């Protein structure tokens, strides 16, 4: 997957991903949310990682996105 235009910047539960996504969108970055558990459920399979999601951003916005992710993580840990 090294030739992809998107990079995973965060992974976590639905609530944390919603917070991260909101912060990214506030500065004009449109992330892609990947939810394997939901995809498996819709296909009729059982899923062990229900509620876990990954956040991907375009490589052109990667540096800016990582700064925001680091800030949000620090706020959540405080």
Image (spheres, grey):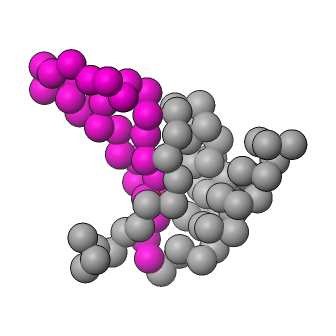
Q: Locate residue 51: give its quadrant.
A: top left
Q: Residue furthest left?
A: 44
Is residue 48 at least partly visible in the picture? yes
Above or below, comparing residue 1 to residue 44 in the picture: below
Q: Residue furthest front?
A: 48
Q: Exactly how many numbered labels are in the figure?
A: 0
- What residue is shown at x 24% (from left), y 70% (from top)? 1
Residue 1 magenta: no
Residue 62 location, x and y as percent?
A: 53, 74
Would you say 48 lies left or right of 70 here? Answer: left
Above or below, comparing residue 5 to residue 23 in the picture: below
Above or below, comparing residue 65 to residue 74 in the picture: below
Q: In which quadrant is the C terminus drawn?
A: top right
Residue 51 magenta: yes
Residue 39 location, x and y as percent?
A: 23, 33
Would you say 6 lies left or right of 67 here? Answer: left
Would you say 2 lies left or right of 58 here? Answer: left
Above or below, comparing residue 74 to residue 39 in the picture: below
Q: Locate residue 45: give its quadrant.
A: top left
Residue 30 location, x and y as percent?
A: 49, 59
Q: Nearer the viewer, residue 31 or 50?
A: 50
- What residue is shown at x 52% (from left), y 32% (from top)? 14
Q: Nearer the viewer, residue 74 or 57?
A: 74
- What residue is shown at x 35% (from left), y 45% (from top)? 34
Give the residues drawn in magenta, as a range: 30-59
Residue 37 location, x and y as percent?
A: 30, 30
Is residue 30 at least partly visible in the picture? no
- What residue is shown at x 37% (from left), y 24% (from top)? 50
């Amino acid at each position: 997957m090294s030739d992809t235009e998107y990079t995973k910047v965060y992974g976590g539960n639905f609530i944390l991903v919603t917070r991260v996504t909101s912060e990214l969108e506030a500065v004009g970055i449109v992330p892609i949310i990947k939810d394997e558990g939901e995809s498996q459920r819709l296909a009729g399979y059982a899923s062990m990682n229900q509620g876990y999601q990954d956040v991907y951003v375009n490589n052109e916005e990667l540096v800016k996105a990582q700064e925001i992710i680091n800030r949000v993580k620090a706020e959540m840990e405080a």
